Amino acid sequence: MLGELYDFPENTMAIGRLDEHSEGLLLLTTDGKMSEYIRSSKIEKEYFAQVDGEITQEAIQKLKNGVEINTEIGKYITKPSIVFKLAESPQLPKRVKKIRDERHGATSWISITLREGKFRQVRKMTAVVGYPTLRLVRVRIGTIHINNMLAGEVKETNSFI
């Protein structure tokens, strides 16, 4: 499927992954060592999450400190992260499939920056504090930002995070 977007070099691989309900920045490389480095805890990954309800400072503080989530291998306490409520909804491309409309209640947008990446971690974290994720967009990996890129858009970079 990626080959339909661009003529990628042989042995191109995704660095990390996004689950089927998530959107955003995905880096590709042919360098396995670079892939490992970017997936390591040395590199920040920032997400914008639209959550169900008007998130409280108490919930944000819990997310910052780390919360207990379930993983494939059992209970796990997430590492401290950078979390804050966005003052307004981010300017993101419209989704093909609408999440829900405002008549079903308030939503909030938060920024959450991690240095780890457990399966569906952000979704599990927000659910644990009582604010399930409705929309999740990865907007930054290291120093590389999604900015105004559109879904399916490809840009080459020589940036080394």
Image (spheres, grey):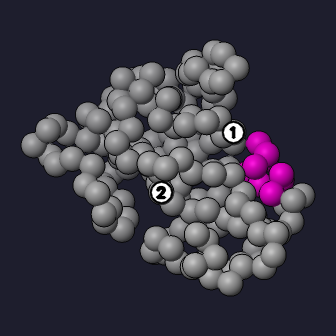
The answer to which of 117 and 56 lies nearer the viewer is 117
13, above or below 18, in the image = below
Q: Which range of residues does the magenta coloring cover?
A: 35-43
- Give me the residue at 54% from left, 31% from top: 64
x and y, in percent, of residue 19 in the image: 53, 47
The answer for how far apart the CA atoms under marks 2 and 1 are is 18 Å
Of tags 2 and 1, the one toward the viewer is 2
Q: What element carries label 1?
A: loop
Horizontal arrangement in the rendering, residue 99 relative to residue 47 (left or right): left
Q: Is mark 2 on a helix, strand or loop?
A: strand
- Residue 157 highlighted magenta (yes or no): no
> Would you name the residue on which mark 2 appears?
23
Q: In which quarter of the image is residue 71?
A: top right
- Nearer-N-terminus badge (2/1): 2
Q: In which quarter of the image is residue 145?
A: bottom right
- Give me the residue at 36% from left, 68% from top: 93
x and y, in percent, of residue 111 in the image: 47, 47
- The amino acid sitting under disc 1 is Glu
Q: How many labels does the image show?
A: 2
Give the class, few, some or many, for how many residues have Cα within 10 Å of label 1's Cα (few <14, many ≥20). Answer: some
- The amino acid sitting under disc 2 is Glu
Horizontal arrangement in the rendering, residue 58 relative to residue 69 (left or right): left
